Amino acid sequence: MATGGKLIVFSAPSGSGKTTIVQHLLKQESLNLEFSVSATSREARGEEQHGKEYYFLSLSDFKSHMKQDDFLEWEEVYRDNFYGTLNSEIERIWAMGKNVIFDIDVVGGLRIKRKFPERTLAVFVKPPSVEELKIRLKNRKTESDEKINMRIAKASVEMATAPRFDHTILNDTLEYALQEATKLVASHIAKPFLNAASLDSPHSILEEE
Ligand code: 5GP
C-alpha cells in the first residue's frame, strides 16, 4: 500500500460548481483518484444511481451505521438528510492503491482535514456570489423553491469557513478554476509523506483518532 493514501477534499456551498471540478479531476489518470461515494438518507434525484453518486440508505439503516461507528464522518447536512463517509469506502479505495477525492460539506471536509492533517488537501470552492448561487440552483431544476432557499440560507454560513481550508478557489471562470484545481491536487499528490510508515495499514490510520 505504498502508492495511494492521499486524501483530497473539495467542499463548498451547494451549487458552487465543486462537483464539476471533482468530475474533471477524476478524468485525469495521472492523478490516480477515486471518488469517495458517500452514504445518504436523502432520496435519489433525477438520474442518480445507488453506488455511483451515493449509497442511498433508509434513515434507519443510516442510523444503525452511526451506532456501529461505521462512519469516518457524518453530518445532518439538512434536516433529516444525513450524509456520511463510511470507513469501508476509504478502505476500498486505498486497497486499489488510489488517492481518495471527496465532494462533501464544509463541516465534514474540515473534520477529515483535522483527522488527517498531513495527508489531506482541503479545498474550498467559492461561488462568485450568493446571488449567482441562487441562479445556478434554480437552473438545475432538481429541487423545490423551499429546498433551494434552505440551501441558500446555509451557504452564507458555509462561506465563513473558507479561511480554515488549505486553499480557496473562486469559481468565477470555470476554465481557470479547473486549471487551478488540477495544479493544487497534482502538487499535493507529488509531496512525500513525512511519516511514510503510516501508509502501511489503512485500518490503523482510520483508528488513529
Ligand atoms: P446534495 O444533496 O446536493 O448531493 O449534497 C448536499 C451536501 O452534502 C453537499 O454539500 C455535499 O457535498 C454534502 N455531502 C455529500 N456527501 C457528504 C458526506 O459524506 N459527508 C458530509 N459531511 N457531507 C456530504
Image (tube, grey):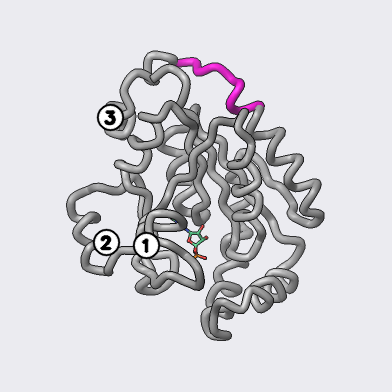
Which residue is label 2 attached to?
A: 62
Reading the chain from its start, which is encountered first: label 3 or label 2?
Answer: 2
Q: Residues within 10 Å of mark 1 (few under 14, many from 20)?
A: many
Label 3 close to label 2 by CB (< 8 Å): no
Q: Quadrant of the C terminus?
A: top left
Within 8 Å: ligand 1 and the Cβ of disc 1? yes
* Magenta stretch bounds: 187-195
- The label shown at residue 40 is 1
Give the residue type at disc 1: Thr
Q: Position of residue 177 (x, y in %)?
A: 75, 47
Spot occupied by residue 127 in the image (x, y as percentages of width and height): 71, 60
Query: What residue do we see at 22% from left, 48% from top?
Result: 69
Q: Is residue 8 above or below residue 2?
A: below
Mark 2: few, some, or many residues within 10 Å (few <14, many ≥20)? Answer: many
In the rendered structure, the answer to whether residue 100 lies left or right of residue 188 reads left
Magenta stretch encompasses residue 190: yes
User: Helix or strand or loop: what does disc 2 sit on?
Assistant: helix
Circle 2/circle 1 CB separation < 8 Å: yes
Residue position marked by numbered label 3 in the rendering: 203
Q: Residue at x 48, y 37 (%)?
A: 100
Specify the amino acid type for callout 3.
Answer: His
Q: Secondary structure at mark 1?
A: strand
Taking the spot 62% from the left edge, 58% from the top edge, the residue there is: 160
